[in-house]
């Protein structure tokens, strides 16, 4: 069984690290899809845009992935507390994931509510769809950066666990 510098088994933290990266990657899937669809969707007519929005019915289930990603990232930060680089990278990833949620609840969700989950066309559809699309683009950027930081945290945690620890 692989051991860290203190003679402790690492399988638990290795598994947590892998789960963290995978969960953040899964969280990135819908955000990335929104980002890459945005360019074509913004060219659509109002009717076509509203029809396309119905493709997202059921995507609320990705909320589970978000909760898991945030929880795993927090757990990884705690597990890596004695490895400063891994800890701060994990906390940075966590902050970015929380930032993506702030964007969702402040800019995206209100548009979902305004349109009754895209079943009603608001008078100001142009503004509504820009806010919704750009909100998702910003959220995708934060989530991608969170994935990079989470991966770096896991890699630095693996490397750091094989070296003597020191408190910072």
Image: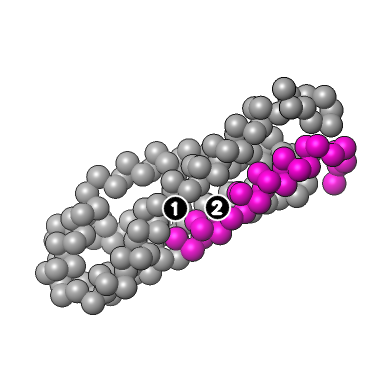
Task: Tell how many labels.
Answer: 2
Relative depth, front residue between 52 and 67: 52
Q: Quadrant of residue 60?
A: top left
Q: Position of residue 151 (x, y in %)?
A: 61, 49
Secondary structure beneath dot 1 equals: helix
In the image, residue 158 lies in the stretch drawn in magenta: yes
Q: Position of residue 106 (x, y in %)?
A: 40, 60
Q: Looking at the image, is 107 positioned above or below residue 95?
A: below
In the image, residue 155 lies in the stretch drawn in magenta: yes
Q: Position of residue 87 (x, y in %)?
A: 71, 45
Q: At x 12% / y 69%, what residue is drawn?
A: 47
Q: Badge 2 local density, few (<14 within 10 Å), some, or many (20+)?
A: many
Secondary structure beneath dot 2 equals: helix
Could you tell me which quadrant the N terminus lies in? top right
Q: Are dots 2 and 1 in contact, CB under 8 Å?
A: yes
164 to the left or right of 36: right
Q: Badge 1 local density, few (<14 within 10 Å), some, or many (20+)?
A: many
**Predominant secondary structure, magenta span:** helix
- Which span of residues is magenta-colored? 139-168
Q: Looking at the image, is 6 positioned above or below residue 131?
A: above
167 to the left or right of 22: right
Q: Position of residue 95 (x, y in %)?
A: 58, 53
Q: Is residue 99 visible?
A: no
61 to the left or right of 164: left
Q: Which mark is residue 147?
A: 2
Q: At x 87% / y 41%, what residue is drawn?
A: 166
Which residue in the structure is indicated by mark 1? 28
Q: At x 55% / y 52%, what residue is drawn?
A: 147
Which numbered disc flags the more N-terminal residue, 2 or 1?
Answer: 1
Q: Farthest residue toward the front?
A: 1
């Amino acid at each position: 069984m692989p051991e860290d510098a203190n003679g402790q088994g690492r399988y638990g933290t290795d598994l947590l690290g892998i789960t963290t990266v995978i969960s953040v990657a899964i969280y990135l899937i819908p955000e990335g899809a929104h980002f890459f669809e945005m360019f074509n969707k913004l060219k659509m007519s109002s009717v076509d845009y509203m029809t396309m929005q119905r493709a997202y019915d059921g995507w609320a289930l990705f909320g589970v992935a978000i909760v898991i990603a945030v929880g795993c990232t927090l757990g990884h930060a705690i597990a890596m507390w004695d490895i400063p680089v891994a800890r701060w990278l994990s906390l940075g990833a966590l902050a970015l994931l929380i930032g993506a949620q702030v964007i969702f609840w402040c800019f995206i969700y209100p548009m979902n509510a305004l349109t009754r989950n895209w079943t009603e066309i608001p008078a100001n559809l142009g503004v509504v769809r820009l806010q919704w699309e750009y909100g998702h683009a910003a959220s995708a950027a934060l989530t991608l950066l969170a994935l990079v930081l989470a991966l770096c945290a896991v890699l630095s945690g693996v490397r750091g666990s094989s070296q003597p620890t020191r408190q910072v």
